[in-house]
Image (cartoon, rainbow, N blue to C red):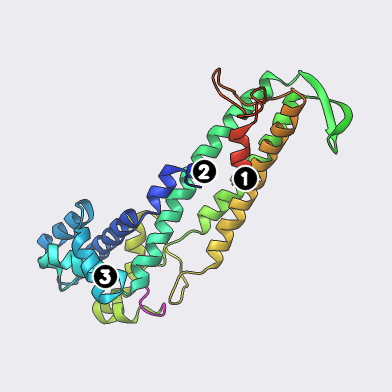
Amino acid sequence: MIKYYDPQIIDRWSDENRHKIWRYLWYKLAKCQKELGVDISDEQIIAFENATINPISDTLYDIEYKKTNHDVVAMMRTVAHQYPIIADIIHLGATSSFVTDNSEAIILHDCLHDITKELKQLLTQILHKIERYQAAKCMGYTHFQHAQVTTIGKRFAAWARGLEVGLDSLEFAISQVKLRGAKGAVGTQLTFQTLLGERTGELDDLLAKEIGISVDDICTQTYNRAIDVTVMNAMSVIASAISKICLDIRLLSNVGELREHFGSEQVGSSAMPHKKEPRFLQSNYLV
């Protein structure tokens, strides 16, 4: 199934990228805590930044993970070993959800923006097709039976409308993807109140400014899982729009009206070389 996936999306959800974001979050947390009065030196901030930019030892991480059976603690110990100057302040006041949930919000945010960009490119191309074929008459179908005359441009317009609905759903989903922030174990910021006192309320605002994503006002141990449902709903709308395009072209290729590109040396079948199967469309429809 790997051939159906977007390499950039795979990279964003990889352990390597996820762990890098964890270190990035520790760096941003330390910067905000320093600004709010916690005793953190400039040298320690530089060390946090270097831990974000530079790779960590996979060997050491694997050793720590086998000992602790805890991915966040294993990463903390690995970073502390490579940058001893921040060993005592890494993850200060935070719980595992600070890195796990906030990193997922960042990855989701980035992925949804990637998808938005690609959908807009697809929609732009379809809009050009609408203009080009707006007067090109063709047979319209109901139940895939000959019905009334329509235009190829109208067909493209129907596809564009589905994509527009998908983009609207996606933009709403992006607006709901927010950081959990620095909320402590159960969402009360109790541990950070011990560190920051009356300035605790400023921490999430600073984090949002540093990272560039707003922070949710309310959460518990984890971020609100309704966000995941919202994202999946948006992806379902997009999948519906794309599957409509793919199915239409597959059906119309059978009557010779529309066909995906078929290479001059491409082969449709080992037994029936005359076949010109819409393999790209079938792959997308399957996904």
Q: Is residue 23 above or below residue 259?
A: below
Picture quadrant where residue 73 is located: bottom left
The residue indicated by pointer 2 is 4
SS at mark 3 in the image: helix
Is 219 or 83 nearer to us in this picture? 83
The residue indicated by pointer 3 is 65
Q: Earlier in the sequence, mark 3 or mark 1?
A: 3
Q: CA distance from mark 2 to mark 3?
A: 32 Å
The residue indicated by pointer 1 is 286
Question: Can residue 40 be seen?
Answer: no
Residue at horizontal 15%, vertical 70%?
Answer: 87
Q: Badge 3: how crowded within 10 Å, few (<14), some, or many (20+)?
A: some
Is 68 or 36 nearer to us in this picture? 68
Look at label 3 and name its amino acid.
Tyr
Q: Earlier in the sequence, mark 2 or mark 3?
A: 2
Look at label 1 and name its amino acid.
Leu
Task: Name the outermost residue toward the front.
Answer: 271
Residue at horizontal 58%, vertical 62%?
Answer: 229
Across and down, in percent, residue 39 comes to: 14, 71
Which secondary structure dominates the residues rendered in magenta? loop
Is residue 51 rendered to the left or right of residue 228?
left
Magenta stretch, residue numbers: 183-187
Residue at horizontal 26%, vertical 64%?
Answer: 26
Q: Is residue 223 magenta?
A: no
Picture quadrant where residue 24 is located: bottom left
Q: Earlier in the sequence, mark 1 or mark 2?
A: 2
